[in-house]
Image (cartoon, helix red, strand yellow):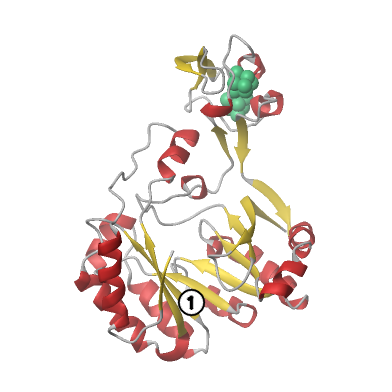
Amino acid sequence: MKGRVYDIQGFSIQDGPGIRTTVFLKGCPLRCPWCHSPESQQFHPQLSWMASRCVGIEDCGKCLAACPRLAISPGKFAENPATQKTIRHIHIDRTKCDNCGECASVCTRKALYVCGTDYTVDDLVARLSKDIPFYEHSGGGVTISGGEPLSQSEFTLQLLTALKRRNIHTAVDTTGFAGYETIQSILPCTDLFLYDLKHMDCAQHRTVTGVANELILENAQRIARAGGKLQVRLPVIPSFNDSEENVRETGIFCKSLGNAVTLIQLLPYHNLGVMKYQRIDDSKPVLEAPVPSDEKIAALRRVLEDLQLPVTVH
Ligand code: SF4
Ligand code: SF4
């Protein structure tokens, strides 16, 4: 069986304990407007274009001729930051593109690439095993992230099982939006869940992310009862979930999970995803909000610490 991966990042230090390698799987059932990895949302492979790498159609233009669907045409004029020369970019008609990757195969500058590669469990484990010395020296391991890893549940289960056979510490970074039977199946081979709690109010959660939060909260309770460990992640999104009231309610919920919660991570909103949206489809709306101030984050941190919860900010 194969899983669809859009990135593998080594030397990750924010996705669980120690130095980790994080595998990002494609596909997610939520549509958070602040998502900083929009290329993770769709399950299918997606053509990406990085404007900063493109040298322009006058000096290259190989992709125009390579596209069998005539989806690429001359685009806007822009300045090449490396040479300060005015160049003409490409325009991709996404309604014609079927993500076949022919254009990417001729783009020597790697401005065009297809996001989403299929791996067998064996191939991926071979790649991840190369980093075992780092895991061993730092108390790290492998984190499976996304997207939503539980949307590729069978692949995730097989990958986790294979990693545990090699004594590698495993973490799963999840929205918690999955049937409990899926979570139950991976519990024995998951050392830690990195578990997102985006809002305690169900209606707001549904309006903004596209799904309700009842299943997510219930799954957290069931993981805790089953002896699983949770590192809870709170993305701090301006005008959505950044009130002290919501963070206090989240903290009280975490308290109710007892010692299953090992840490709460406050993740201040950042707008790095905006650029990534443009790479896959520049017509999509994204949230562009001010980054929360240090004072704001400190105040939210105090709310959780007052509840005697272990908190970190990343
Ligand atoms: S092949 Fe690559 S570098 Fe050349 S014009 Fe197309 S996108 Fe730009
Ligand atoms: S991925 Fe295929 S269809 Fe899409 S622009 Fe490139 S060559 Fe054309």
Dot 1 amino acid type: Tyr
Say which quarter of the image contains residue 76. Answer: top left
Callout 1: 10 Å neighbours few (<14), some, many (20+)? some
Residue nearest the observer in this picture, 202 or 298: 298
Residue 118, x across and y down, in percent:
69, 49
> In the figure, is residue 73 to the left or right of 20?
left
Residue located farthest toward the top when viewing the structure as drawn? 58
Is 126 located above or below residue 220 in the figure? above
Q: Is residue 54 at least partly visible in the picture?
A: yes
**Ligand 2 image position (quadrant):** top right
Is the C-beta of the residue carrying label 1 under 8 Å from the nearest atom of ligand 2? no
Residue nearest the observer in this picture, 181 or 300: 300
Say which quarter of the image contains residue 299. Answer: bottom left
Residue at x-position 33% and y-position 57%: 209
> In the figure, is residue 67 to the left or right of 287?
right
Residue nearest the observer in this picture, 118 or 271: 271
Residue at x-position 41% and y-position 51%: 35
Is 74 located above or below residue 15 in the figure? above
Q: Quadrant of the C terminus?
A: bottom left
Q: Is residue 67 at least partly visible in the picture?
A: no
> In the figure, is residue 49 to the left or right of 202?
right
Q: Which residue is mark 1?
A: 180
Say which quarter of the image contains residue 111. Answer: top right
Residue 136, x across and y down, in percent:
73, 74
Residue at x-position 38% and y-position 51%: 270
Residue 13, x across and y down, in percent:
57, 65
Residue at x-position 62% and y-position 72%: 18
> In the figure, is residue 23 to the left or right of 304?
right
Residue 51, x across and y down, in percent:
52, 27
Q: Quadrant of the N terminus?
A: bottom right
Under tag 1, what secondary structure? helix
